[in-house]
Image (cartoon, rainbow, N blue to C red):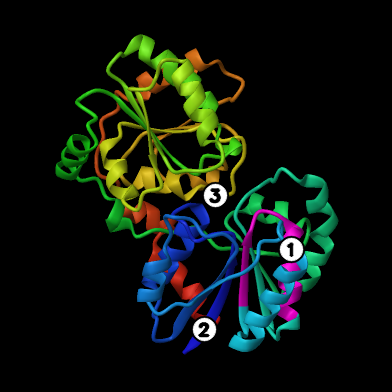
Amino acid sequence: MTRMLHIVGSMSPSGIGNYIMNVYRNIDRKKVQFDFIVHEHRDVSFDEEIRRLGGRLFYVTRKSVSPVKNFREICRVVRRGRYRIVFRHTDTSTVALDLLAAMLGGARVRIAHSHSTSTPGVRMHKLFQPMLNMLCTRRFACSERAGKWLYGDRPFEVIINAIRLDEFAFDPALRERMRQKEGLGSGLVIGHVGNLLPVKNHLFMLEIMAEVVKRKKDARMLFVGDGEMRVQIEELRNKLGLEKQVILTGVRTDTAALLQAMDVFLFPSRYEGLPIAVVEAQCSGLPCLLSDVITKDVDVTDAIVRMPLSASPATWAERILEVALRRRTASDERLFAKKGFDIRQMVKRYEELA
């Protein structure tokens, strides 16, 4: 049995965390086990499930506290665990130092995995990019654009973010139970799943919702996730008088069930790698309204509609009401499997590394 070490920011229910856990739950754990170096502990995380599945967690000092201690601790974990294969999941090349620590700790296979197409610190990203490329023995990316962002003109492998298709299949009975449980009533429910970060554009979504409510007073919006923007989002929500209409659920582990309760999936991000939340929404039969910067690699069904971020909140609101009229039906799982979104296909890539 091979133990693979994943270095992450946190193992909370978010994009990267969900991706890794999707693989971990479905991989043959008699052949492969996952362990984790984690930089930040959050109240809602997969820690208990990881331990139940046989994984180990190592919490290290954050770089913002002491970059030297962080480097030494990563090196020590790799050396003591005799890890041959180490992954670093990231959206920036500045994590090259983590791969250097892994190399000095004895890891022969060092894999960077790109999960986005931009980062706030572009200058530092460009500075560390040559070092990252030198230290990687393999380069993974969730999409072509994400790979070009992290590695430039160096070769890389696209590892599509996949899901368990049956988990997200449309279920009318579950839909009614979730709407009742969450107190959503019978009106229009607009949903979004993602960390509360500037890139996700939540403040713009609130402006859109203010326009929607002018047209449909019983409409509701669900923000599923948490993050640094929460206070700002709450302040603008209250300023716009949307306290009852916009619900911040916090981090949830029942995202698949919450998707059932929605009528439209809204995703006006400023940039993304390959947002698995959009794939999950399509699998659950939801019409999806996205910003036009989102890669078309995510398109599986004809439920995708794109809008420019330059369009006004009122224009976005009108389009939401249009797509909400579409009949929601179960999606054809064969379409998702054909495009590589079936988790069974993806786990084979990991098992082949062992």
Side (left or right) of 234 relative to 28: right
- Range covered by the magenta-colored residues: 86-103
What element does badge 1 sit on?
loop
Check disc 2 and report its element: helix, strand or loop: strand
Q: How crowded is mark 1: few (under 14 residues within 10 Å), some or many (20 or more)?
A: few
The residue under the point 75% across, 58% down is: 94
**Horizontal relation, residue 289 to residue 297: left or right:** left
Magenta span: chief secondary structure: helix
Tag in front: 2 or 3: 2
* Residue 82 showing in the rendered view: no
Q: Position of residue 8 (x, y in %)?
A: 58, 63
* Rendered location of residue 348, percent (x, y): 46, 75
Q: Is tag 1's residue or tag 3's residue first in the polypeptide sequence? A: 1
Q: In this view, does 67 lie to the left or right of 186?
A: right
**Is the residue 271 above or below the residue 255 in the image?**
above
Q: What residue type is labelled 2?
A: Arg
For this rendering, which residue is in front, 49 or 86?
A: 49
Quarter of the image where one finds residue 347: bottom left
Please give the name of the residue rendered at 52% of the width and 57% of the height, measured from the top-left corner: 16
93 part of magenta stretch: yes
Residue position for label 2: 3
Give the distance between the C-alpha atoms of the residues marked 2 and 3, in whole angstroms: 27 Å
Element type at mark 3: loop
Tell whether position 277 is magenta: no
Q: Residue at x 42, y 71 (%)?
A: 24
Q: Distance between the residues labelled 1 and 3?
A: 32 Å
Given this view, does label 1 or label 3 mark the residue nearer the observer?
A: 1
Spot occupied by residue 70 in the image (x, y as percentages of width and height): 70, 68
Instruction: Identify residue for label 3.
Output: 274
Kindly give the residue lying farthest to the front in the view shown.
65
Residue 66: mark in rendering: 1
